[in-house]
Amino acid sequence: MAGLCGLAGAMITGLLWLHQQRPDSPLLGLYGEEIAYGGPLREDLVLLAAILAVIAILAALLSSIGGATKPSAVAAVLLGAFALTFPVLSWLGSIDAPVRTVLFPGS
C-alpha cells in the first residue's frame, strides 16, 4: 500500500512539475491548461499528491516498526518525499502558476 500511494503521489507531482516548467505541453490537452495556469484541478491535484505522500510515508514507517526495514519501505519513503516537493513549495508560496503571456492582445 505504501509503495502504491508513493508512486501515485510521485506521478501526480511529476505531472504538476511538467506543467509548471512547460505550461504549453499538449500532454493533457485542456486539462493541462487548467493545471498549468491555476484552477480548481491544480489545487485538487496538489492536495491529492500531499495526502498520498503522507499516507505513503506513514505506512512505510509503520510497516518497518519491530522488524528489519524492507527495500519497499525505503522506496515508498523516497517516493513520498518526492511527492511532497510540489505541494510544500506551492503552499509556502515559492511556486505560483505561470503567467499566461499574450503576444498580440485582441487577436
Image (cartoon, grey):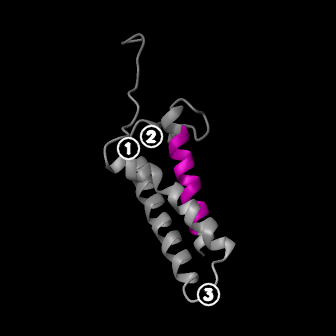
Instruction: Give the percent coordinates (x, y) of residue 26.
Output: 60, 34
Q: Residue at x 49, y 65 (%)?
A: 52
Which numbered tag is attached to residue 39?
1
The answer to whether the residues at label 3 and label 2 have Cβ atoms under 8 Å apart is no
Q: Quadrant of residue 2?
A: bottom right
Q: Are marks 1 and 2 in contact (CB under 8 Å)?
A: yes
Q: Cβ–Cβ below 8 Å for labels 1 and 3?
A: no
Query: From the viewer's perspective, is the residue at label 1 or at label 3 nearer?
Result: 3
Please give the residue where the numbered disc 2 appears in the rendered image.
34
Q: CA distance from mark 3 to mark 2?
A: 45 Å
Q: Which numbered disc, 3 or 2, marks the residue closer to the eye?
A: 3
| Crowd band around label 1 with a 10 angstrom C-alpha radius: few (<14), some (14–19), many (20+) | few
Q: Position of residue 64 (x, y in %)?
A: 58, 81
Residue drawn 57% across the image and 82% down it: 63
User: Which segment is the magenta one?
Assistant: 5-18
Amino acid type, label 2: Glu
The quadrant in which the N terminus is found is bottom right
Q: Position of residue 89 (x, y in %)?
A: 39, 47
Left or right: where 67 falls relative to 61: right
Residue that carries the numbered disc 3 in the rendered image = 67
Residue 73: numbered disc: none
Q: Residues within 10 Å of mark 2 (few under 14, many from 20)?
A: some
Q: Secondary structure at mark 3?
A: loop
The stretch drawn in magenta includes residue 12: yes
What amino acid is labelled 1 in the image? Gly
Return the disc, 1 or 2, that comes first in the chain's sequence. 2
Residue 14 shown in magenta? yes
In the image, is residue 91 above or below residue 1? Answer: above
Q: Earlier in the sequence, mark 1 or mark 3?
A: 1
